[in-house]
Amino acid sequence: MHATGLEGPIPTNISLLNKLTDLRISDIGGPAQAFPSLSDIMGFHNLVLRNCSLSGELPVYIWAMKDLQTLDVTFNKLVGEIPNNISARSMLKFVFLTGNMLSGDIPDSILKTGINVDLSYNNFTWQGPDQYACQQNMNLYLNLYKSSAAVSPLMRIHPCMKDFTCRRYGCSLHVNSGGNDFTVKESDGEVHYAGDASVDGGSARYFSSSTNYWGLSSTGDFMDDNNDQNARFIESTSSKSLSELYNNARISPLSLTYFCYCLRNGSYNVSLHFAEIIFTNDSTYRSLGRRVFDIYIQEKLVWKDFNIVNEAGGVQTPVVRHFNTSVTDNFLEIRFYWAGKGTIRIPSRGKYGPLISAISLKPTFGSCSEEDKKSVTVYVIVGVVVTCISLLVMSTLWWKGYLQCKKKQRKDLEGMELQTISFTLKQIKAATNNFDASNKIGEGGFGAVFK
């Protein structure tokens, strides 16, 4: 039951369905409710209770369900910790705890080979580079984006990275979602779009470019598509009616976040580029698809039930939507969320969820280059300080008379006609009576001085 319009709470007698193996409820309204009693149903394969206003702790018995493969309790209000003793015999393949208030340490027992674990948007203990969750070459997908309650925004978006600092502060972002790097001519000149085609799929995917200061976080599994690898997170078309910017797109079964950090604070314009490249406008089954999702910018809902085809006036047709936003902590976040609406099996399984072709971010506070404006400001300040100190030193020397003395010496020599005369050794010996000691008048830097 996805986005049915029903309201909670989930009835307690649901536990009477003790032979149930698959329960999926999402996006129901109503007040906060406790986690439903499911202890009598231990044969679950898939348990999805997404965005159901669940509060309190996640029952420990959930982790003891030996046949459970998919656990999705995303975007609720759950608190508490993950137990340390999750059985090694557990069949879990997908664990989605995104968007709760879970805390404590991340137990090693949940990080099994081949598992997909998404802990983003929580309050867990921040994972430093020495923690097990941050070890390299683990054969699993693990998303720790904003998984901790770290005070620093940079620490929240950069798990496992100690002492990260911004070497420069930019003021724009251009991403070719699902495509490669390329340059396009726009009204204000050539614009380079960074591609994310090399970022593979994965139900719990986190990527960050530490050189260009942007990244993405993707959550969710295209259930029932018989593809545990989830490699189909990029869609493409060979349509000649679309430009290169719209021939590729990134999709996500639940939540897709793009973020940009080390930004200059100020006002920006966000341009979101869309084109529906999966559905068709002919008389076939593919034309019946309907894609609906929500758009959040800086954690604020800016468009509910966005439909690409409706906004563009058809499929294979580009459409751009612009939004104004503000950056106050050098960080921008754009999130697309599937709230369970639209079709999920047209033209085939795994073709639903948000779809984005490209993202552009430009400042509205004036012209700006990609140079480190803050560093330039620092250099200017240092230059001014050095100049002031130099002037102060010179003024002090002048006041004490050091510079005036030299000026006086130059003034004393003015008007004097200086001449240079050469003498032979014979003339000098004759003048000094062959360097007679009686003619010696003293010692100089180069020897005796005679008159």
Image (cartoon, grey):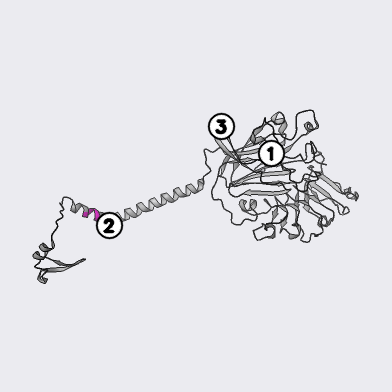
**Mark 3 highlights which residue?**
187
Residue 335 against residue 409 in the figure, above or below:
above
Q: Quadrant of the N terminus?
A: top right
Q: Residue at x 34, y 55 (%)?
A: 393
Q: Is residue 9 visible?
A: no
Helix, strand or loop for the magenta stretch, by majority: helix
Picture quarter containing residue 193? top right
Q: CA distance from mark 2 to mark 3?
A: 61 Å
- Give the residue type that dot 1 points to: Ala
For the record, the magenta segment spans 405-409
| Residue 117 percent across, percent down from the top left | 74, 52
Q: Sequence-wise, which precedes: disc 2 or disc 3? A: 3
Q: Which residue is mark 1?
A: 249
Reading the chain from its start, which is encountered first: label 1 or label 3?
3
Q: Mark 3, residues whose alpha carbon is within 10 Å: few (<14), some, or many (≥20)?
A: few
Image coords of residue 244 (percent x, y) = 64, 35
**Three-letter code for the amino acid on which mark 3 is drawn:** Ser
Inspect this view and state whether residue 197 appears.
Answer: yes
Q: Is residue 348 left or right of residue 418?
A: right
